[in-house]
Image: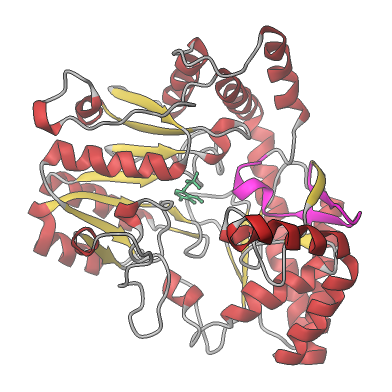
Amino acid sequence: MEKLFRYLESEYRKKTGKSAALFRRASRVMVHGGSHSLRLWKPYPFFPAFASGAEVVDVDGNHYLDYWQGHYANILGHNPEVIRRSVEPHFRHGTFHTGFETLSQVELAERLLASLGRRGLRVRFTTSGTLASTYAVMLAMGHTGRRLILKVGGGWHGASPYLLKGVKFHPGAGFQASDSAGVPSALSRQVLITRFNDCQQLSDMFKKYGRRLAAFILEPFIGVGGFLFCSREYLELARRLASHYGTVLIFDEIISGFRFCASGLQKTYGLEPDISLFGKLIGGGQAVAAVVGKKEVMEGCEPSGPGSRRVHFEGGTFSSHEEYMRAGLAMLDYLEKNQDRVYPYLGQQAERLRRGIEKVFREEGLEAVCTGDGNELVRDSSFFMVNFPKKKNWYRRPEDIWNPERSEVALREEALKLALLVNGVHVVHGGGCLSTAHTPEDIGRTIEAYAAAARIFRRYL
Ligand SMILES: Cc1ncc(COP(=O)(O)O)c(C=O)c1O
């Protein structure tokens, strides 16, 4: 493995000299040289000069087909013309920060609610998924007067102090550990972890703790946990148990919202969580996140809300920002109007990519398994994650994806990343998501890049 890394690193360094210099400069003033560890891969990240559609061009002039697409927010690719065109006229009137409540946020809230097709909901906007999940937990605690939170092992809901447990897999402890300093241990003890898609364990957890659970938070499609969909049975059980025990059910749809259809996955599954979180693509490339919840739960943040139970959910200085809201509206408008074309296209191309990648590795005598497949309810999944099983491994849960005894995690996270970068493709966690800007030719070129990576692996492993 070491020889492989050495070879890949030297190839990457050869083509990214200017990025290397910029990273040295960044490291003199910024922690670890940047702002988000997923963007700070080894030995250093490239710096983009330009991004358009499926492609990013770095400061050294290298072109990459990008499957990270702005943390999966850019379903129409980088800098889509359709969003730019609809936001630009507003620049003439000034879209800088005013600090007032805007009409455009009302329109975006109306659009969000219409897409869900549910009544009796209220929306509040904020500027990040992390804030949205934090407020959702506070609302649940305020509403129920309870303190315990249940979350799924491997689930990522942003860097909320309430939810930084059970994110990373720790050999020995699995997903039971706390993942950040700075979170009081008393708070960490309030968070319980249950296994993804495991109905029996969920029933047991509710039986034991149900009356003390303020919230059960989960992603219907788990993102960093492995691009896996919850089964219908699991989500229906979650709904039933939460209702029975008076627990607030929170669906984190920050990745899944508008990604698989012009609504949330909750609509596809026919389920009504008490609170839903949206982010990423609802801002059309700007910093927008939304907490959408049943009126009686959301009322907890009204100033006239119930006394000491009032939740201080203020969206933040930049919430309701005109430009952000306009971009979000343009995105949701576009998806609503073009849904019959957008989602089937993404689904078909992603399926071709997933199977194509598995094939090229097989041809080199290596086994690669792509997750991201849809299920009986979700036909059009645009995600793919490439995994290298150690033993016979089925990739049903985050444990299968992140346990280094079951999967070649470093091969996926580090070696495959560099092997693809030197072949003109940028991925995170061995894959990512498609955008409508990825053409069938791009998918063909991407499969060829994976084939080149497979040949390098065979040579050095
Ligand atoms: C499912 C999910 N929830 C919450 C978040 C946090 O969002 P943000 O990065 O905007 O804080 C993310 C971010 O990747 C996410 O994937």
Q: 48 above or below 388?
A: above
Picture coordinates of residue 292 (x, y %)? 36, 31
Magenta stretch, residue numbers: 53-75
Identity of the residue furthest to the top in this view: 93
Task: Name the residue: 91% across, 54% down.
Answer: 61
Q: Is residue 72 magenta?
A: yes
Q: Which one is nearer the viewer's eye here, 224 or 37?
A: 37
Task: Name the residue: 61% across, 48% down.
Answer: 72
Q: Is residue 388 magenta?
A: no
Picture coordinates of residue 83 (x, y %)? 70, 26
Q: 268 above or below 431?
A: above
Q: Quadrant of the C terminus?
A: bottom right
Task: Name the residue: 18% across, 43% down.
Answer: 141
Q: Quadrant of the N terminus?
A: bottom right
The reply to whether residue 158 is visible in this rendering is yes
Picture coordinates of residue 319 (x, y %)? 46, 26
Q: Which one is nearer the viewer's eye here, 427 or 269?
A: 427
For the rendered model, the colour scheme is: secondary structure
Q: Which one is nearer the viewer's eye here, 256 or 35?
A: 35
Picture coordinates of residue 324 (x, y %)? 58, 25
In this rendering, position of residue 378 left or right of residue 334: left
